Image: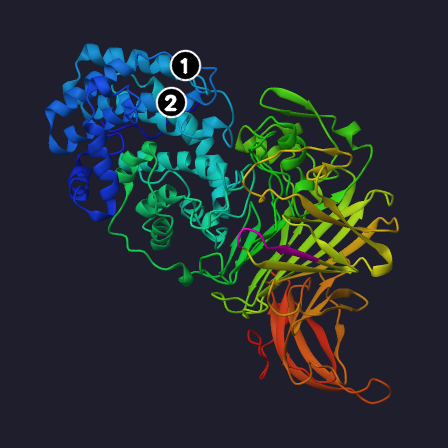
């Protein structure tokens, strides 16, 4: 059913998770304080008698089995080995109802515990007992959700992408391979020929598409083949970039210990001392890849391992890897293709009073469905509280996977900080949503479409050859200090995420780190949106927990409850004041409002699921509209917000804020023409200050920046050269600094870099 695995288990025992050469290292771990919690709990599990293993006060018979099998290996305790065998032979005869939700997790772990005895206690098991084990292993495998042979579900998402194939069936197949290779050939065949290529496709981005909740669960399952094949002597079957995936949850961790939300997840309770704990993932990553920053995060996330993880925490931890502090990492990380996400921070300090800003800017190149949301082009912001949020909740009164709240609001674009274009006839093209063998009538939220009608891709070929591509990254840049960058820039084309109602949607994010506690940072969001018909309304969304306050073009959002003290100020500079409408939606009866229906989902004890949003829309119908929003963050009790000002030329538009001038091309394309920027006038408070300029959407090649002074009314302009620099195809961005003087800035394009000779005095790579 799958190609014959090219890697086969070595003809020796033990070989499941470890071999003889690993035993001395494991014996030395028994006395190491770094793994004390895991070892002591394993010893506690081993003390339960056979008659106690099924009692309520015992963590579970599988843990008793595994702990005693480990004692047999490490201490040559024959009595413990016989105890493990006797309990395993009894336990694997259990009967299960395969229709019970998530029962495959229990079935698979029982198979694995039996396989550990089969492999680790091989000398204690008779031929008749081996036949008995194998017969029941196959019986249990047939009850798994993936089926046996494991043909059900896909290679990217679903319960089959957790433990049942990648750990439980594969591990059992390794144990019994000499006597019966069928299970290994099936499980390893599927892992190596479907699941590994699928992960080697998205691992290079360093981002797991199933989010902050399910992404961690699925990634744990994906890490087991790493250890299983490596411990058999085959090295890592995955691309080396697997090691980068854990940084997703390091960078999106808020200073209060929780994570920015992504995909199907549930708001956490407002307990500021409780972290969202992923320490087991960081133990696995730190142990395998010897990454000191993962060890640091593991220690920060300290906590009690779940019973199911204790054995592997002992087997796979490397206590010799020393932690390094996170502040050695760059404040900005780009999670590149095939994801296209950038996370920018202003620091690494923790606590509810932390001055750290965390900004997530998402292009989102592929849509895998399942627990992933229709959120291409969305952003989130945290500062002294969650300010620009993902709205909704997975759990609650109308929660979980098949609930109306989940299918019609939470997963949809309308619950995220992205763009809507409302085509009243869209449901004629997309009348249904299909997933999990079920079919739902679709709803029209004005947002992005479900590729493949909502069903996930089954294989890598499926993903690449159907309509799962939803966006492209057009440019990205971080500068100029790579460790503590002043700016972080990301631009994407998100047109393909929508139906034919959208001709073009390009969004640019520019995060500015002011390195100032009173005014720490700002995010500029520039959009060019072209709809198929001018009468299709467009809505720019910004979601919040507390009620927004709108005055003119300025929206103020605070996070004042539960001890938080953050504030977001959004200045809408485009559409112009005469052609914009800013409305707030939310409050009782409209918390999760979708064009006439409220898909309510109460989750008591926290307000993090939000219940408010603003919608910015142009008044006059038009195919093309530009949106320019400048979002700054500060403390509620801090100084007044900074003034912002729109700056516009014939081809570019942008904003001036806190000594920064940022500009974008109006047509969304790369510019190769000279650009003149009127930036300072007589009497301006900026005169005499060092200013920062940033022009995006520039053609790749050599650009010069000059300061022109003069009145422009008959007098000759006096020019002073400021900078010559190469703009790369990757970034399209030119950044310069200058001392403000009356006049204007002239940007001049000199052509492709390869055609330009080096000139004396030209700062080709400097500022």
Q: Is residue 314 visible?
A: yes
As drawn, 491 above or below 185: below
> Magenta segment, which residues?
556-563
Instruction: Residue at 28%, 19% (x, y): give it.
Output: 54
**Residue 74 at x, y percent in the picture:** 15, 34
Give percent across and percent down for residue 312: 29, 36
Q: Position of residue 116 (x, y in %)?
A: 25, 25
Residue 199 included in the magenta stretch of the image: no
* Residue 446 at x, y percent in the picture: 75, 39
Question: Left of 182 or right of it: where is 670?
Answer: right
Can the viewer see residue 173 in this picture? no
Who is closer to the viewer here, 29 or 53?
Answer: 53
Query: Do callouts 1 and 2 mark residues in contact (Cβ within 8 Å)?
Result: no
Q: Which residue is mark 1?
A: 142
Frontmost residue, 400 versus 550: 550
Tell me the mark number nearer the camera, choosing from 1 and 2: 2
Q: Residue at x 32, y 45 (%)?
A: 288
Residue 759, compared with residue 75, is above or below; it is below
The quarter of the image holding the C terminus is bottom right
In the rendered view, would you say 735 is above or below 403? below
């Amino acid at each position: 059913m799958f190609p014959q695995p090219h890697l086969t288990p070595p003809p020796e025992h033990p070989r499941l998770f470890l071999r003889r050469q690993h035993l001395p290292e494991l014996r030395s771990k028994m006395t190491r304080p770094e793994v004390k919690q895991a070892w002591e709990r394993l010893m506690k599990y081993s003390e339960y008698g056979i008659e106690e293993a099924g009692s309520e006060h015992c963590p579970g018979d599988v843990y008793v089995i595994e702990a005693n099998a480990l004692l047999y290996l490490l201490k040559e305790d024959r009595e413990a080995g016989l105890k493990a065998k006797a309990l395993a032979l009894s336990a694997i005869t259990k009967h299960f109802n395969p229709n019970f939700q998530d029962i495959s997790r229990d079935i698979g772990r029982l198979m694995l515990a039996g396989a550990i005895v089969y492999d680790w206690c091989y000398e204690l098991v008779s031929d008749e007992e081996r036949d008995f084990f194998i017969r029941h292993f196959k019986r249990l495998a047939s009850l798994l959700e993936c089926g046996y042979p494991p043909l059900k579900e896909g290679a990217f998402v679903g319960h089959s992408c957790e433990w049942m194939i990648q750990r439980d069936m594969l591990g059992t197949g390794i144990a019994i391979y000499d006597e019966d290779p069928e299970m290994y050939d099936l499980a390893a065949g599927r892992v190596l020929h479907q699941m590994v290529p699928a992960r080697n496709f998205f691992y290079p981005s360093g981002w797991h598409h199933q989010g902050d909740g399910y992404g961690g669960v699925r990634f744990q399952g994906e890490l087991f083949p790493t250890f299983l094949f490596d411990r058999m002597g085959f090295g890592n079957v995955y691309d080396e970039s697997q090691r980068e995936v854990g940084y997703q949850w390091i960078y999106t961790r808020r200073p209060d210990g929780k994570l920015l939300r992504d995909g199907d997840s549930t708001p956490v309770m407002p307990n500021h001392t409780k972290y969202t704990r992923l320490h087991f993932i960081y133990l696995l990553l730190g142990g395998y890849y010897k990454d000191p920053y993962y060890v640091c995060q593991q220690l920060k996330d300290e906590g009690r391992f779940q019973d199911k993880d204790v054995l592997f925490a002992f087997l796979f931890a490397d206590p010799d890897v020393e932690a390094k502090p996170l502040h050695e990492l760059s404040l900005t990380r780009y999670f590149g293709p095939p994801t296209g996400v950038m996370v920018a921070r202003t620091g690494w300090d923790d606590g509810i009073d932390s001055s750290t800003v965390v900004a997530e800017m998402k292009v989102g190149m592929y849509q895998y469905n399942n627990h992933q949301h229709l959120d291409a082009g969305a952003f989130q912001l945290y500062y002294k509280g969650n300010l620009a949020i993902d709205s909704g909740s997975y759990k609650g009164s109308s929660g979980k996977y098949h609930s109306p709240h989940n299918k019609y609001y939470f997963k949809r674009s309308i619950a995220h900080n992205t763009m809507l274009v409302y085509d009243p006839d869209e449901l004629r093209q997309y009348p249904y949503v299909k997933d999990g063998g079920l079919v739902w009538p679709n709803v029209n939220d004005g947002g992005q479409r479900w590729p493949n009608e909502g069903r996930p891709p089954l294989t890598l070929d499926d993903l690449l050859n159907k309509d799962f591509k939803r966006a492209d990254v057009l440019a990205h840049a971080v500068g100029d200090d790579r460790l503590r960058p002043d700016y972080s820039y990301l631009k994407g084309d998100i047109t393909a995420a929508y139906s034919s109602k959208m001709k073009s949607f390009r969004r640019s994010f520019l995060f500015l780190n002011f390195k100032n506690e009173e005014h720490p940072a700002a995010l500029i969001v520039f959009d060019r949106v072209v709809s198929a018909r001018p009468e299709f309304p467009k809505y720019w969304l910004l979601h919040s927990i507390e009620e927004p306050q709108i005055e003119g073009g300025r929206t103020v959002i605070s996070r004042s409850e539960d001890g938080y003290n953050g504030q977001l100020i959004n200045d809408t500079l485009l559409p112009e004041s005469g052609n914009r409408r800013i409305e707030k939606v939310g409050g009782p009866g409209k918390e999760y409002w979708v064009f006439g229906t409220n898909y309510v989902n109460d989750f008591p004890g926290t307000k993090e699921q939000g219940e408010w949003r603003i919608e910015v829309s142009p008044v006059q119908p038009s195919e093309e509209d530009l949106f320019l929003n400048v979002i700054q963050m500060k403390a509620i009790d801090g100084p007044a917000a900074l003034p912002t000002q729109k700056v516009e030329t014939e081809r570019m538009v942008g904003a001036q804020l806190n000594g920064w001038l940022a500009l974008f091309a109006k047509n969304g394309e790369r510019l190769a023409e000279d650009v003149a920027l009127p930036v300072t006038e007589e009497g301006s408070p900026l005169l005499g200050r060092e200013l920062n300029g940033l022009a995006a959407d520039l053609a790749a090649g050599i650009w010069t920046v000059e300061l022109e002074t003069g009145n422009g009314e008959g007098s000759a302009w006096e020019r002073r050269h400021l900078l010559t620099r190469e703009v790369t195809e990757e970034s399209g961005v030119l950044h310069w600094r200058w001392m403000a003087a009356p006049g204007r800035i002239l940007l001049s394009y000199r052509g492709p870099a390869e055609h330009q000779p080096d000139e004396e005095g030209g700062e080709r790579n400097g500022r």
